[in-house]
Image (cartoon, helix red, strand yellow):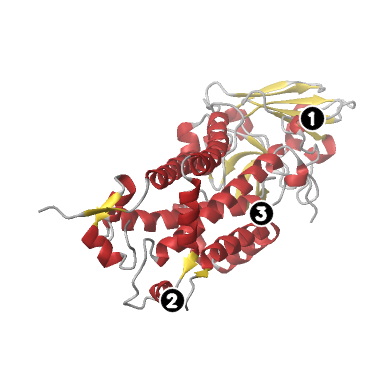
Amino acid sequence: MSARLVRRFTRAERLLHWVNALGFFLLLGSGLILYLPSLSVLVQRRPLIKDIHFWGGIGWMTSLVLVIALTDPRGFLRTFREVDGFDADDLRWLRGRRPAPQGRFNAGQKVNTALTGAFIVLFFASGMILWLGERDTRFRFASTVVLHDGLMFAALALLVGHLYLALIHPATRHALRGMTLGTVREDWASTHHAKWKPQ
Amino acid sequence: MDEPRKYGRGVFLVTVAGGLSSLAWGKAAWSKVSGIVSPIAGAIAPILPTQGWRIYTVSDHMPTFDPATWRLAVGGLVEKPVSLSYAQVRALPRAEQVTTFHCVTGWTVTNVHWAGVRLKDVFDLVKPLPQAGGLQFVSAEDPYVDYLTMQQSVLPEVMLAYEMDGKPLPQEHGAPMRLIIPEMYGYKNVKWLAGINLVQQPADGYWEQLGYDRDAWVGRSNGYSS
């Protein structure tokens, strides 16, 4: 008998996740070509890669806003409230105390979502300041490149942890199904997200 | 706790505020941190991917260097124009220095060991005419050019560098030869040198035509003041 499945992520939520992932990898790839001398030599064509990076960043932000605005804005507002709110069990979970029954998002996922959102804003802001600084000295700050590069390293660290939990860690990798097909096993959900009541 | 606390937005706002405020303190903080971790950084520097450098180019492909065909043409307002081969350049008096390289975008590489030729030794060959007031440095990366005044070109640490950190200048750093003027931001340090023309007065180089300062003094040009 196959396990009963419950819906964890809506189509709109999955679309937002994958649009974000696609944009991030496009910018990470083009950014590393601009950043690492060995890749700069291998690929060359810096003006083209710069254009891809810049317009990729504009496209990334625009598409995230469009997905939220045009698919299910009310649903995203509900999701925002879910990841915004931390109850006593969430705080216990973050301190490593168990049991700490979790909702649809565990506390780590809530922190990851908040940090990812902040990183997107900071990537966009520092990228635009770098672009403007190339054209106008009023936007030229010695620390902009430190911020943009530091964000890359911080985002990469988050990504490595995220990929480990989504693809490798036996207890959590089932969650990937939720972000691809939308559903997860009910027994897995009740173990890892005991306070979540699937609709 | 009855009602969930709104910590999610708190994490978001604190991170954004910290990131944006770092525009004021980020580089200074990084300089201190990198100073503290310098013994570790020094140990792993050879395997670090960038060693602090970024490679900026303005055209699609970096010029390639063939020692058999490369020439450095020095002409313009001079008595004796010359076209030097790589071997002839290497035969000129050798100078060495360890200096810091500053990019106008904010990154810095310290303790770069350069070897090359002083411009005064090139002037001895070509004998500038009295009306020469500046030098045009022409890169093989078309259309990159930049200029220095005659006075700037003979500052003590100005060099035509053919070695970097004990090795022939790599392609991405301007092989076989680049201009080094540590007192000015990197865009004045023309890579892939192909020619030097002595002119009456300096004009705007590649980046200056796009709004950058002609005199790119580190810390006191391009909107920076130290």
As drawn, the label of residue A88 is: 2
Left or right: A160 with respect to B137? Answer: left
Q: Pointer 3: residues within 10 angstroms few (<14), some, or many (20+)?
A: many
Looking at this view, is B39 or B19 the one in front? B19
As drawn, the label of residue A143 is: 3
As drawn, the label of residue B204 is: 1
Looking at this view, is A69 or B53 the one in front? A69
Give the image location of residue A97, x and y in percent: 36, 78
Give the image location of residue B189, x and y in percent: 68, 38
Number of the front mark, 2 or 1: 2
Residue sitting farthest toward the right: B131
Do discs 3 and 2 share a chain? yes
Q: Are marks 1 and 3 in contact (CB under 8 Å)?
A: no
Subunit that carries the residue with mark 1: B
Left or right: B177 with respect to B154? Answer: left
Give the image location of residue A66, x and y in percent: 52, 39
Amino acid type, residue under disc 3 in the picture: Ser
